[in-house]
Amino acid sequence: MNVLLRTEPLAALDGLLDQFLRPAFARPAAAPAPRRIRVDVKETPEAYVVLAELPGVTKEAIAIDVEANEVAIIAQPPAAPEAKDGEKWLHVERRADRAERRFALPLEVDAARAEAKLADGVLELTLPKKSPAAARKVEVH
């Protein structure tokens, strides 16, 4: 029986280049930049609705900051589980890196009335618009 393996010929060459050339040009390791959360933002007459992709993240791992018209969503998913006795990881692609997204909305929002729901890996954030301050006439005495 033949075993079919997926091979990437350039991957082997990359490995050799890494072994021989990288030490000569190595730079100090920098902290990895956080991944960027993908969002959709829609506007209704009363509020902004933000839908953010956060697969595999629990609600306890999400922080949302709202100040005036600026919004920050930060997610720190738990680290990948460690192998138990008799187990070993053969291949790992899922990452447990910090992810964040910061953006500004056209109008100021009422942070006190903001609501957030997490379902099926999508965070739905409803940010009611602040009502504009009523104009007031000032009389001169």
Image: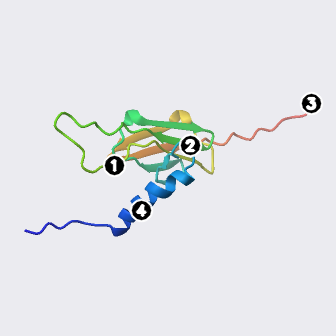
Q: Secondary structure at mark 2?
A: strand
Identify the residue at horizontal 43%, vertical 43% (top origin): 97
Q: Earlier in the sequence, mark 2 or mark 1?
A: 2
Q: Earlier in the sequence, mark 2 or mark 4?
A: 4
Would you say 72 lies left or right of 94 here?
right
Q: Is residue 123 visible?
A: yes
Labels 2 & 3 near each other (Cβ < 8 A):
no
Q: Which residue is mark 3?
A: 141
**Which numbered mark, 2 or 3, is in the foreground of this view?**
2
Q: Secondary structure at mark 1?
A: loop
Residue 67, image quadrant: top right
Which amino acid, mark 2? Val
Q: CA distance from mark 1 to mark 4?
A: 22 Å
Q: Is residue 43 visible?
A: no
Looking at the rendering, in which quadrant would you find the C terminus? top right
Q: Position of residue 64 (x, y in %)?
A: 50, 37
Q: Residue 71: give its label.
A: 2
Q: Residues within 10 Å of mark 2 (few under 14, many from 20)?
A: some
Which amino acid, mark 1? Arg
Q: Residue 135: give its label.
A: none
Residue lying furthest left: 1
Q: CA distance from mark 2 to mark 4?
A: 41 Å
Looking at the rendering, in which quadrant would you find the N terminus? bottom left
Labels 2 & 4 near each other (Cβ < 8 A):
no
Q: Earlier in the sequence, mark 1 or mark 4?
A: 4
Labels 1 & 4 near each other (Cβ < 8 A):
no
Residue lying furthest top: 141
Residue 7, image quadrant: bottom left
Q: Which residue is mark 4?
A: 14
Q: Earlier in the sequence, mark 2 or mark 3?
A: 2
